[in-house]
Amino acid sequence: MTTVPLNVQDVSSRHDVLQRLRPTAAWALAPAAAVLLAFWLLPLAHLILLGGQRRDGSDSGYWQVLSSAQYLGSLVQTCLLAALVALAALLVGGISGVFLARQQFFGRSALVALLTFPLAFPGVVVGFLVILLAGRQGLFASLGLELAGERWIFAYSLTGLFIGYLYFSIPRVILTVMAACESLDRSLEEAAHSLGAGHWRVVCDVIVPGLAPALVSCGAICFATSMGAFGTAFTLGTRLNVTPVAIYNVFTNYANFTVAAALSVILGAVTWAVLLLARRVAKQSGTVL
């Protein structure tokens, strides 16, 4: 194989072209930078400063949140709920995604479309579906009345909220896992089988590590979505002790903008930290693999 040496004149001409393209690229990025500054960075900076203000001689919004058992309990409960939703979605959606990616059968495309259809619903519709399932006049209430003589109602609790969040988290995992399965090297599985590894051994030692970066990233997205989802929680009831509902109550019922801003910033910081950690873990998993 022969290589053609680069001429000094060619290198110089390429450098001149890049120098001419830099102003053009700057002008092309200017609209996006203006939108980012006006509609994201400036409001975020104002929100952060607002959370540190003192209202009527009281402490700052951040200190009120961090020193309140109610707000901290709401944040912890929101984090635990989001973590459980992410784990359950990874378990159910991961198995389903691998199966749908590896198996070909009649009606597969229709089944995938049906499983991912909940992504088209807003949070309010998801909450309404949970009420139809487990509300006071829902299917479980009628079934419990027939079987046990009492209505089974759990739509207006954390259990109902868990089901609602899981409803739109599983489709995300299914789509991500199906896409990740296409990039897996099937020869590694065949080599493991040829060496005497059983089915579950191949799953644990080959398939799961191969899907690890996608699973970590998708789990982080499910966690972040569950942390900030408001429509479903608001539909199921404003008495649920989760942070998005707490922000709404403080903002609308008490007009306490300082505490509402502090809660928003803390919620965003926790979510951002989890996303950053997941990104590093996914990158390390990809490097190791």
Image: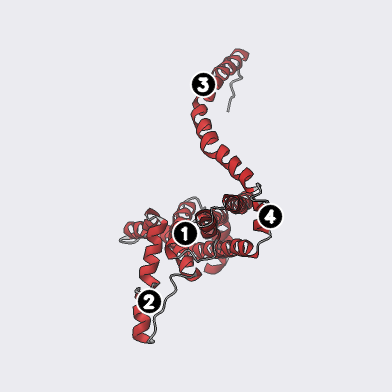
The outermost residue toward the top is 9
The outermost residue toward the front is 56
Which tag, 2 or 1, sits closer to the chain's start? 2
Residue 78 pos. (x, y %): 56, 62
Q: Amino acid at mark 4?
A: Trp
Mark 4 lies on residue: 63
Q: Amino acid at mark 2?
A: Phe
Mark drawn on residue 140: 2
Please state which of residues 156 and 98 is positioned toward the viewer in this rendering: 156
Mark 1 lies on residue: 169
Mark 3 lies on residue: 24
> In the figure, is residue 260 to the left or right of 146?
right
Which numbered disc, 4 or 1, marks the residue closer to the eye? 4
Which tag, 3 or 1, sits closer to the chain's start? 3
Label 4, label 1: how many angstroms apart (C-alpha)?
Answer: 33 Å
Label 4, label 3: how many angstroms apart (C-alpha)?
Answer: 47 Å
